[in-house]
Image: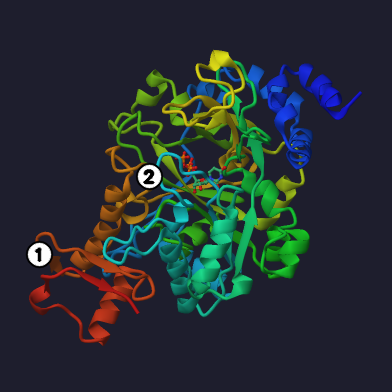
Amino acid sequence: MDTKGIIENKLRAYGQEQLLTFWDELSDEQKAFLEAEINRVDFEQIQRLFEHRNDVPESSQMAYRCSEPVSFRLSDLRERVDSPPFPNSQYDPYEAREIGEGMLRHGRIAAAVVAGGQGTRLDFPHAKGFYPIGPLSNASLFQIHVERIRAVARKYNTRIPFLIQTSPATHDETITFFREHKNFGLPDEDVLIFCQGTMPSVRFEDGKIFLREKWEVAKSPDGHGGFLACANAPAPDAWSEKSREEGVLADMESRGIEEIFYFQIDNPIIDIASPEFIGYHMLSRSEFSSQVVRKVHPKDRVGNMVMVDGRLHVIEYSDLPDDAGARRKPDGSLEIWAGSIAVHMMNVKFLRAKANLAGSLPFHIAKKKVPFVVTSPEEGAPVGTHIKPESPNAIKFEKFIFDLLPQANNPIVVEIDASTGFAPLKNHDRVPTDNPTTTRAGLSNLYKLWLNNMGIQLADGVIVEVSPLFANSAAELRDRLLAEGMWPKDNLITESVYWHE
Ligand code: UTP
């Protein structure tokens, strides 16, 4: 039997013969490429996942028997200059902060960003990390994150390695971007770029795997939870030998890193490696801690963090039954209140143990827009046409990092105020929320908050942007303005200004 016949037999068993639609017109090179693509697909897994696509997630039932997680509230020590900290029940915020600072000083903390998403909702032709988000500077998301990391490292006279998860959609250009910008000032050995895995995308109606090109399977990154596997595998393009040979987690262990501060690329106001957050995580002996915001409405589009049978779980907003989500406590506040903002502290040993266990993370399904090549006239266009769909047409299979939570010991949540740490960039400006305008406003509001807190007002329409290297907290900003004789006259700023080094 010829190659085509052998592949056809294999595909027929799973109803995926459409992948060979264009075989006869492909060059030898393209045929070899497609054959390798097909050999990499686990058809049984795809079939199983598709068959179970409509299963009601177990987590929706949990909403009826859950309780509140162990929680702390960040006392805003970073934003407020003088006011007393928020009283936490169990641990003193100053003690937490001291412990976090100690971890930083001793070089025990790394920062990790997941930046492998395709950012389809943003409608931007590059990796989301390149998006120019600084309200006055147009600094990219990557630049702002690196400046925050450098600011913290400088303050504690330490090094904070920066782990950057990419995907085939973002990998090469991310490497080039960092090279071109000289890593925005970080040394090469502290920038660890590694690429996550992919999963084939299938048609929503019948589970047929799409072709992206006539010789190429349509694939998408396997979710932010892909982090677990790819951080534990050799990272061939990393700029550190240990990462290249054994993976970034092994590299972190050998550098004495014990905990990873994990965040998403789209949130430029995040307080990276907040000592107080690190401190609560350490004091609680938690293996996995998460920042949350207090939900205002039952249907707020954030994952809901709840305790079930002594374990912390996330119920996605789409899985939260209306009646359970609307339940209120006697004081009128929501019972299910803790909304995840995907900022975590994760213990390195815990991650390594889980990464070595097959199946630590299940796949979820996401309905998304996936461009494809038409393989049958029934698809409404001539065979061979490239289609860029206007609405979601495909299922992507994704792993979520927070599925590790129920496996973690002593998990905690730490509440923050969204205005001080959460302004995600998800959508283009035609959508009213989480778009470039709201995220830029989130950045300038943070700096305005710092200034107001020290008694400085902004005239109408004035925007202040602060590079983290100029000041990374209200207290640092106050000290810098005083030390450099820049305190505004009459405590009033009348013109927009970008303060940077
Ligand atoms: P989102 O779920 O917001 O997805 O990712 P996205 O890809 O950025 O955007 P859309 O949905 O296509 O519009 C949340 C975070 O997880 C990362 C993203 O880069 C972002 O930081 N992510 C997502 C990955 O690293 N890998 C993935 O496979 C998916």
**Quadrant in the picture for residue 130:** bottom left
Residue found farthest to the top: 378
x and y percentages locating residue 272 in the rendered image = 46, 62
Q: Amino acid at mark 2?
A: Val
Q: Which residue is mark 1?
A: 459
In the rendered image, is residue 282 in sight?
no
Which residue is at the front of the view, 214 or 150?
Answer: 214
x and y percentages locating residue 198 in the rendered image = 65, 40
* Quadrant occupied by the C terminus: bottom left
Counting residues from the start of the chain, the first of labels 2 and 1 encountered is 2
x and y percentages locating residue 18 in the rendered image = 68, 21
**Residue drawn at the location 74% of the way across and 63% of the way down:** 244
**Quadrant in the picture for residue 20:** top right
Within 10 Å of disc 2 (Cα), the crowding (few <14, some 14-19, many 20+) is many
Which residue is at the front of the view, 387 or 219?
Answer: 387
Going by the image, does 306 lie left or right of 293?
right
Q: Amino acid at mark 1?
A: Ala
* Quadrant occupied by the N terminus: top right
Q: Nearer the viewer, mark 2 or mark 1?
A: 1
Q: Are marks 2 and 1 in contact (CB under 8 Å)?
A: no
Color style of the picture: rainbow
x and y percentages locating residue 338 in the rendered image = 41, 39
Q: Which residue is mark 2?
A: 293
* Labels in figure, total: 2
SS class of the residue under badge 1?
loop
SS class of the residue under badge 2?
strand
**Residue drawn at the location 59% of the way across and 54% of the way down:** 171
Going by the image, does 354 lie left or right of 275?
right
Q: Is residue 188 above or below residue 3?
A: below
CA gap between label 2 and label 1 equals 30 Å
Q: Is residue 376 above or below residue 423?
A: above
Within 10 Å of disc 1 (Cα), the crowding (few <14, some 14-19, many 20+) is few
